[in-house]
Amino acid sequence: MNDPQLIDAQSARAAAEAAGLSPEEIADKVAEAVAAGRKTRLAKANSPLSDPEPGATLESRASAPHITDAAALVQDDLYKTRTILLKPDNIVESSQKAIQTELDNLADKTKRHLEKMSEYSLAVSSKIDDDQFDKEVQASAEAIASFEKISVDKMMEFSLKTLNANTAAAVSELPSSARFQFADVKEGFTKKLAEDYLGITDGLVDSIKGVLMESLDLKNKEKAAKEAAKSLPKDKPQTYADVSICTSEQLIGKTVALKRDKINKANDNMLKNMNMFLGDLSSGLAGLTGALGDIKIQIPDIEGSITSALQFTNASSSPNIFPFQMPPVPSVSDFYTMAEGSGAQPDAATPSPLAIADIASDLTPPNITIPKIPFAEPFKGQGMVDLVKDKVTEAASEQGKAALAASEKAALDMF
């Protein structure tokens, strides 16, 4: 119920209560008043003598039924928007295709945003203001971050499984009395590694948004679109706005490169702590030191292992319980639209773990220096500040003395 309808309902209710009507009659009067008020306002709005309202209007619907209005254009764009479908059969590859689908949606929005500067139909149907497109990029970055977290978690799982496999020989030589200690330490390592990688994924949104803004180069493209709209060609073929955007491989590779130091630090800390723990237990065990020496060599950096990490499959992730079960048939749909139904990314758009690893290893992260904020210091030549003689302090101390004297007097009166 809008404001005019609420006013009609309140007026009708007050008049009915003043007339002493029953609750059922009051409800009927309120419904009649709201319907009558709506009918009156609708007739006034459709009257040729009504005040004009700002915005585009369609005045020839009856004589031109094939004219498309703004609402139909908005509905058409909504029907063509791709809704992402994740597939549990290969969740890492599916999440990377989901990133590509989200990038395609953002490219379509960018195209409509730029072409509305020269197309009247897009300008009328656009729901995004010129200065609000940054919110669309922010929303896409948040969606992409949720999908990329799957790949980052797979890297964490690969690092943990690799460490467990490489420490198996050393752990097998531990006495049974020390196995529970290793189990406790391993649980702590797992929690700490999950905490470190959670900190890495917490900053993915800002990193992804920075990569998207750099790839879109929106300010220069908006400037070029405005210049093109000033002098539209008459006889030349129609041109379209340039909305080239990075692929999912480039996006994942760049964001991994930005987080490379944190990922290597998390892995190195886990390895270092494991070596320290096994080193403490190796003093009385023959042959354990040699096994420890191989651990650090067998744990590669993230650049060398990202291809293996993204293709790593845990044995416990198989949906088959018994070996004679037939494997499930994976779905081929990566997204669906209300207009065309389900669809899939082409084979050329399937991300390559090797290409992601090459981008992550070749890209040098920017050296961002955070300015050091100094502590507040007194000015040169500033005089001494005596806090003891401050008036507020003296007043508080006098009040404290009075309270103390009152409490002592009350204590003496008890005896």
Image (tube, helix red, strand yellow):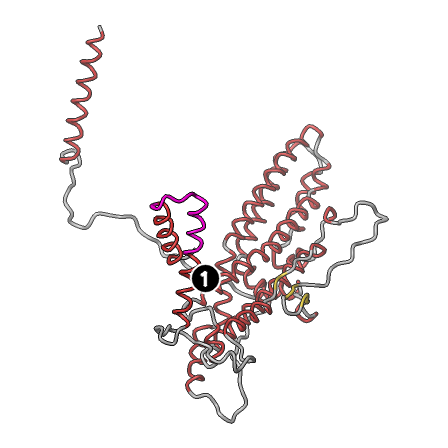
Residue type beneath disc 1: Asn
User: Against 295, is 353 above or below?
Assistant: below
Image position of 90 with respect to 104: above or below:
above
Q: Residue at x 48, y 73 (%)?
A: 125
**Viewer-nearest residue: 218 or 313:** 218
| Relative to 92, 126 lies left or right | left
Quadrant for the N terminus in the image = bottom left
Q: Quadrant of residue 48?
A: bottom left
Q: How many neighbours does mark 1 have within 10 angstroms: few (below 14), some (14-19), or many (20 or more)?
A: few
Majority secondary structure of magenta residues: helix
Q: Residue at x 57, y 71 (%)?
A: 76
Of residue 62 and residue 118, the one placed in the foreground of this image is: 62
* Horizontal arrangement in the rendering, residue 192 relative to residue 59 (left or right): right
- Position in image of residue 280 (x %, y %): 61, 35
Q: What residue occupies the far top of the structure in this picture?
A: 415
Residue 124: x and y in percent read 46, 75
State yes or no: residue 62 in magenta.
Answer: no
Q: Quadrant of residue 393?
A: top left
Viewed as shown, does residue 40 lie left or right of 375? Answer: right
- Looking at this view, is 8 or 23 the one in front? 23
Q: Which residues are magenta?
A: 18-33
Residue assigned mark 1: 367
SS of the residue at dot 1?
Answer: loop
Q: Which residue ends up furthest to the bottom in the rendered image?
A: 235
Q: Residue at 42% of width from left, 51% of height from top?
A: 29
With respect to residue 70, does 30 lie above or below?
Answer: above
**Among the 4 quarters of the image, the one containing residue 192:** top right
Front position in the image: 174 or 129: 129
Q: Residue at x 34, y 73 (%)?
A: 51
Residue 144's x, y, as percent? 56, 60
Residue 357, percent from left and from top: 62, 63
